[in-house]
Image (tube, grey):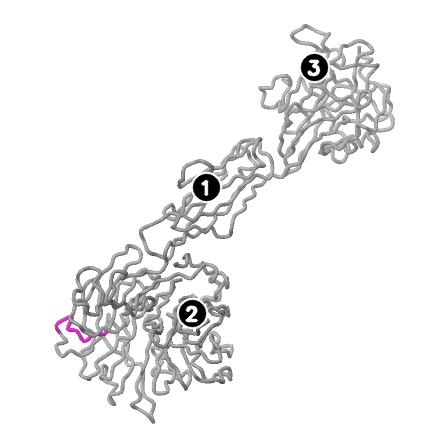
Amino acid sequence: MAALAQSTDHLVFAGPGDPFNPHARGETETLFSTLAGITNSPNSITSQFFPDQGPKANRYFTIGVDDFIIPEGERWIIEEVRVVGNFTDNGSPQGMNLFVLASNGAGTQPDTIDIFNDADPNVLFLGEGLPFTDADFGDFVIALDAPLILDAGRYFVGVQPIMDSSLFGQWLWTESASAPNSGMTIGNESAWMENFDILGNGACVNQWGARVTDCAITDPDDVSVPERDLAFEIGGSRVTPGITRNAPALLTTSEAGGETSFTLVLDGIPTETVNIQMTSLQPGEAQLVVGEDPLGVTATVSFDTNNWDQEQTVRVVGMDDPFIDPGGPFVVTFAVVTDDLLYASFTLDDLPGGNLDDFCDIFRHDNAVDADASMPSASSNAGRLAYLSTADPLGTNGDGSTEIFLFDTTTLLQQQITNTADRFFSRPFLSGDGLRLTFSSDADLTGQNAAGRVEVFLYELGTFTQITQTTDVNGALAAGISEDGGTLALLSADDLDGANGDGSREAYLYDIAGQSFTQVSVGPANEPTEDVGELIVHRDGEAATYLRGDPADLFQWHRGVGTGNLIRTGHHTRIDGTRDGRRISFISSDNIDNNNPEMNAELYVVDFLSAKRGLPITQVTSSASATVEDAAINNRGLLGFVADGFDPVGTNGDLGKEFFITQMGSGTFEQVTEFADNQATQARFEGIDLGADAKQLIYSFNQDLRQRVFLEGVRPGFMLAVAAWRGEETNTVLTLMPMLCEPAN
């Protein structure tokens, strides 16, 4: 039988018109091929299972195998193998044995000889007696009975027709030259093996050998160099594994049960089940659900070879809480858990979200029909509010006098801190952490104000401290407190530090730790008795801005520099500023830079950072007849202001007095309130506070004809309109988070 080990009887090419050509058949993609290396006079070698030879339990076989390589990053779905060969006569195989085997470390041969043992981990595919299509007298297309999925690496494929060993009943596999995409270079050849010493030279019995070099399986009469590869193609499809997630940039839910969703799907078939596990890090704000599973902190979607290309939907449902707040942020994290090594290498970025409060406005006194609440002040993050009210929400203000209240927006704890009989209270001011509060009053809260003058007080942890003890009939007026709570700002005509001999009203800072006053304002030499009308404190007491005279000029003071520096002369009112003092907002009717020829009261911002570039003042509002009456600015560049006759976006048809917001540099305005002004009833706003770093609006407004305190968030779309804001201290760009608040109905 040795003479039947090779033949040159048949020549096959897979040309465009050949039925063996997969592209002509419109079938699977050719993933790998050595057919281009077939010469004009190819040899063919034995690779066959002989059912009529040897003991029944161990029939004789020969097996040739050749390697193929899957590139890095690719995954193949192998559906068929095509081989070129020929029969010694009109043979008819009973079926085809097909093998795909793992390579040894050197890439020279398979890593197992137990090729009929599908339990062997190196036998990646074993198909025995598979049906086949005879494309042309020994050219076979063998379809796998199940697709084989393989990742990057080197593998070996082998085929065996099942045929008797009669002289005219054998099949021979055509040799091929090493092709560029074969994965083997000349000299690194296909492998061969037989299970009995019959056709070979005895060197490759039950062990692999290099087919030509070790086993001498080629045509001995061919004087040319033997071709080292075998002629075959791998058919199927290429897969690029990946995970596609379709999700909004910001998951938005609401405490009223509003929900959103996102989908997940795999880009390519996996070799093992892929589980994508999701966790809501803030389950009090939002939870997850997939299909009919219960709502929970975690959820999992699973993909396998059957459903990998089917999108799965994950619902994100907002959770309610007992707080009246501007909503809460949440984050959904992802973990890919699988034994599929390619998919195990994938990660998914966290998804941010926001759970919108079901009612953003804080309506503190809905049961106090005849009561008012006004003059609010907020901590930096708006977590605590202080305000004046005549209501009796706790049963401790039965006489309906004006008192100071504190409210914690997180715990909903409300506290009445004063209890007097119809005394005067100025607007209270909170420190950044909300633990210190300053205000003015003519009440005798400490036993030191028997004269009943308006004095400045400090409240901390349930204790009142009287800061001033004035002799001037007008007393002292609290004007603010520094962010760190260490410095109070106040106005007084008293000579509090020995530098106010003329008795004009001056601006002072009071250092709480040192219990000392510093006069930060000095009257002009030609008008020494001009009063200071407004004062704000910056940089934890290291700077202050104030207005002096009528019309009021704008000054700024810095510790160590001496008296205040004149910023500009003219008409100024309602000053506010960022906590570092680098941006000051004010209202003016001056025709600054010739942009206000009507001399209306418009809103401006002095930008001391831009001043170095020669652009110190920005006009924020501009209209033919509007009047801006009050304004505030915070560190985030958010401006809130009250204007009469102003309609920048077409929502104030009656041109009444309303509250508006804008963001520095955006040119975008939004109307916050809606009040039907008429001659009998007009909108009234008392106190605007945006908090140093808050994204909330705190204001007092007569919405129902009684003054109420509102805490309201900026709708998401507004803050997203301008995506970045230049930081106060650095040149880095800080991304603004949108306000997480649904508009109140």
In the image, residue 181 above or below residue 702: above
**Camera-side mark, 1 or 3:** 1
In the image, residue 307 above or below residue 209: below
User: Residue 243: x, y in percent?
Assistant: 56, 41
In the image, residue 430 above or below residue 263: below
- Between 711 and 334, the residue placed more toward the observer is 711
Q: Quadrant of residue 161?
A: top right
**Camera-side mark, 1 or 2:** 2
User: Residue 252: x, y in percent?
Assistant: 45, 51
Q: Which mark is residue 19?
A: none
Near mark 2 (Cα within 10 A), the count class, few <14, some 14-19 or many ≥20, is some
Type of the residue with mark 3: Val
**Mark 1 lies on residue:** 278
Say if the magenta span includes residue 441. yes
Residue 265 seen in the figure: yes
**Mark 3 lies on residue:** 205
Instruction: Please tell me whether mark 1 sits on a helix, a strand or a loop.
Output: strand
Q: Is residue 71 left or right of residue 286?
A: right
Mark 1 and mark 2: Cα distance apart in space = 40 Å
Q: Quadrant of residue 372?
A: bottom left
**Mark 2 lies on residue:** 660
Say if the magenta span includes residue 26. no
Instruction: Please tell me whether mark 3 sits on a helix, a strand or a loop.
Output: loop
Type of the residue with mark 1: Met
Quadrant that contains the N terminus: top right
User: Residue 313: x, y in percent?
Assistant: 50, 41
Near mark 1 (Cα within 10 A), the count class, few <14, some 14-19 or many ≥20, is many
